[in-house]
Image (tube, helix red, strand yellow):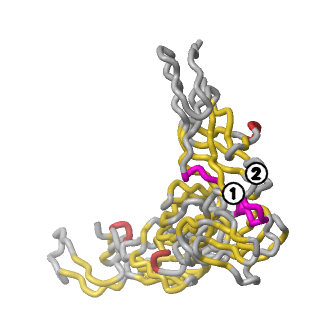
């Protein structure tokens, strides 16, 4: 247990020789607000040091020679406390903090509080406490003695146009925020004078910007996790994509937000908008919803001779909005070359000559999906046309190899069924 063998006076003094060293005296370096009505009742924040010293806590706060009610003293930490001013006569007094063992703060101009004997206004708080640099939002002030107010001040900007503020009651004013920057004091002026600054400052926030979203597209059904990058995202209150609120919004930093896309219109671009106390960013076309899946209705021509290079035209819907939306066209399992987007309803592709005779399904794949039309294209085996035979003659009784020249002989060995000389089948 700590033994105290000396007595320290309320204002100053030293311990008796040989006694333990007392706790350090508290200091007061500032108070806010710096004034209030003579009736008291003002919540004052005191800043300084030595407010939490273990076995020597704060026991009193005096306004001049008048002590504040102990019940209103709240020690926040070693350098901050709040207290309610007691009633007093008009004038300026020192705010002195006292500890249990008698140490008190020294007086200085930094601790002075002025009591007013007239009903000057008093601003206790306002909401919201931040807004866009462009102004324009409504701010509600609460306090005392607002009746007859002639102006509201945000820093050096005076709002005196009666159409821009409304005295709702003696304790409430609504005002349209003027344009401004930075952190500013808020005051109210009435015929009785101008209030001391509110205990806290109003913060003007810069408008956000959005520079990128990743990925840049996704299905029309939504539910795509995206990362939005830009500036001034702190305090963001909402994100919309294409006018619809995104879900699972998380502000991971002043330049990054993660979210999940809402459902949108297939094939449409969407503006990505972030709203903060500083406002909303400019409209953009940074995100797009994938086009609806394709539907293949027909293929033209429907048949050609095998062994020829053929351009086919696919007709349907949902083929996308540009060349980049067309992924591939297949005839059977063979990928056609040069798939070319013509419109959302037409795509052409080239079927190579190497595809064997037969009837094939045709499949188109786009960024929106895949569609297949069964038995849509037939390659007909060409009728052979024999032009020449070489040699044209040979000695009877000798095995002779002959070469047949012409067209329509097919594309592989399997297409040749037989060769006959007269009624004799050649081997």
Image position of 94 (left or right of 213): right
The residue pinned by badge 2 equals 88
Would you place residue 4 above or below residue 201 in this image? above
Residue 351 in the image, given as x and y percentages of width and height: 42, 77
Residue 280 in the image, given as x and y percentages of width and height: 60, 72
Would you place residue 344 above or below residue 25 in this image? below
Q: Residue at x 73, y 49 (%)?
A: 85
The residue pinned by badge 1 equals 91
Image position of 281 (left or right of 66): left
Confirm or deny contact between disc 2 and disc 1 (CB under 8 A): yes
First to last magenta residue range: 109-127
For residue 117: magenta? yes
Q: Is residue 239 visible?
A: no
Residue positioned most to the right: 169
Quarter of the picture holding the N terminus: top right
Indicate which disc residue 105 carries.
none
């Amino acid at each position: 247990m700590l033994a105290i063998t000396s007595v320290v006076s309320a204002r100053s003094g030293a311990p008796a020789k040989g006694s333990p060293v007392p706790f350090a005296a508290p200091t007061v370096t500032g108070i806010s607000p710096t004034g209030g009505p003579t009736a008291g009742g003002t919540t004052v924040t005191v800043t300084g040091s030595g407010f939490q010293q273990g076995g020597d806590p704060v026991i009193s706060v005096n306004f001049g020679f008048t002590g504040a009610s102990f019940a209103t003293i709240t020690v926040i930490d070693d350098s901050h406390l709040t207290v309610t001013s007691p009633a007093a006569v008009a004038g300026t007094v020192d705010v002195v903090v006292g500890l249990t063992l008698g140490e008190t703060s020294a007086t200085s101009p930094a601790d002075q509080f002025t009591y007013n004997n007239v009903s000057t206004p008093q601003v206790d708080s306002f909401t919201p406490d931040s807004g866009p640099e462009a102004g324009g939002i409504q701010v509600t002030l609460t306090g005392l003695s607002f009746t007859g107010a002639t102006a509201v001040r945000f820093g050096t900007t005076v709002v005196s146009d009666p159409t821009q503020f409304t005295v709702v009651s003696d304790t409430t004013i609504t005002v349209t925020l003027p344009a401004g920057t930075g952190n500013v004091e808020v005051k109210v002026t009435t015929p009785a004078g101008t209030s001391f600054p509110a205990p806290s400052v109003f913060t003007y926030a810069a408008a956000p910007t959005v520079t990128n979203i990743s990925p840049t597209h996704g299905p029309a059904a939504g539910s795509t996790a995206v990362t939005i990058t830009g500036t001034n995202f702190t305090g963001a209150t909402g994100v919309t994509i294409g006018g619809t609120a995104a879900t699972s919004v998380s502000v991971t930093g002043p330049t990054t937000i993660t979210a999940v896309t809402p459902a949108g219109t297939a094939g449409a671009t969407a503006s990505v908008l972030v709203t903060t106390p500083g406002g909303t960013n400019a409209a953009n076309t940074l995100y797009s919803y994938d086009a609806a899946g394709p539907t293949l209705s027909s293929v033209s021509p429907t048949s050609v001779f095998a062994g020829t290079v053929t351009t086919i035209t696919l007709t349907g819907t949902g083929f996308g909005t540009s060349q980049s939306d067309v992924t591939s066209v297949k005839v059977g399992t063979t990928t056609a070359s040069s798939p070319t987007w013509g419109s959302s309803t037409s795509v052409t592709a080239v079927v190579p000559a190497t595809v064997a005779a037969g009837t094939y399904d045709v499949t188109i794949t786009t960024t929106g999906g895949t569609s297949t039309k069964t038995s849509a294209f037939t390659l007909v085996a060409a009728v052979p046309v024999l032009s020449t035979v070489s040699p044209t003659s040979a000695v009877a009784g000798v095995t002779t190899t002959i070469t047949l020249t012409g067209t329509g002989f097919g594309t592989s060995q399997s297409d040749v069924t037989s060769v006959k000389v007269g009624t004799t089948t050649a081997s």
